[in-house]
Image: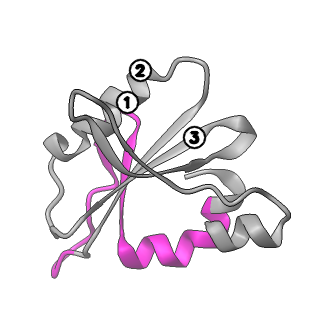
Amino acid sequence: MIKNQMNSGGRRELYFFRDQQGLEVDFMAPGSRGGLRLIEVKWSKTIVPAMAKSLVQLRRAIRRRTVECLIVHRAPKHGPGTSTVAPGVKSWSVEEFLQSYPSALRSGI
């Protein structure tokens, strides 16, 4: 994301977020049309709805922007991974994320 922002003349923006109550998100970056992208990275191959908790809470707290939420994880050994973990939260394997990286930056995750 940073390299794409630099090459397109945009500001270099990639943040880690943690508030005083301990709510945290691994990556926060600019999204499409002034929105935000929240990305949580998990080592696990199995994604469960509880892993989306911080993304959902932070998205709920941000009211004046469009917020896109994504969990990036290791690919499962058998079968496709989960595409929607919680309402408004998608999950992609690392491979899916890297393959879709250019289009995800253009259109939003």
Foreground pick, 68 / 63? 63
Amino acid carrying label 2: it is Ala
Residue receiving disc 2:
61
User: Which secondary structure, mark 1?
Assistant: helix
Residue receiving disc 3:
36
- 8 falls in the magenta region: no
Question: Percent position (x, y) of residue 100?
Answer: 56, 71
Sequence-first tag of 1 and 3: 3
Q: Read off the magenta span.
A: 76-104
Amino acid carrying label 3: it is Leu
Question: Percent position (x, y) of residue 99?
Answer: 53, 78
Tell me the quadrant of the picture where the N terminus can be found: bottom right
Q: Are marks 2 and 3 in contact (CB under 8 Å)?
A: no
Residue receiving disc 1:
58
In screen coordinates, is 87 left or right of 33?
left
Residue 70's place in the image compared with 45, above or below, is above
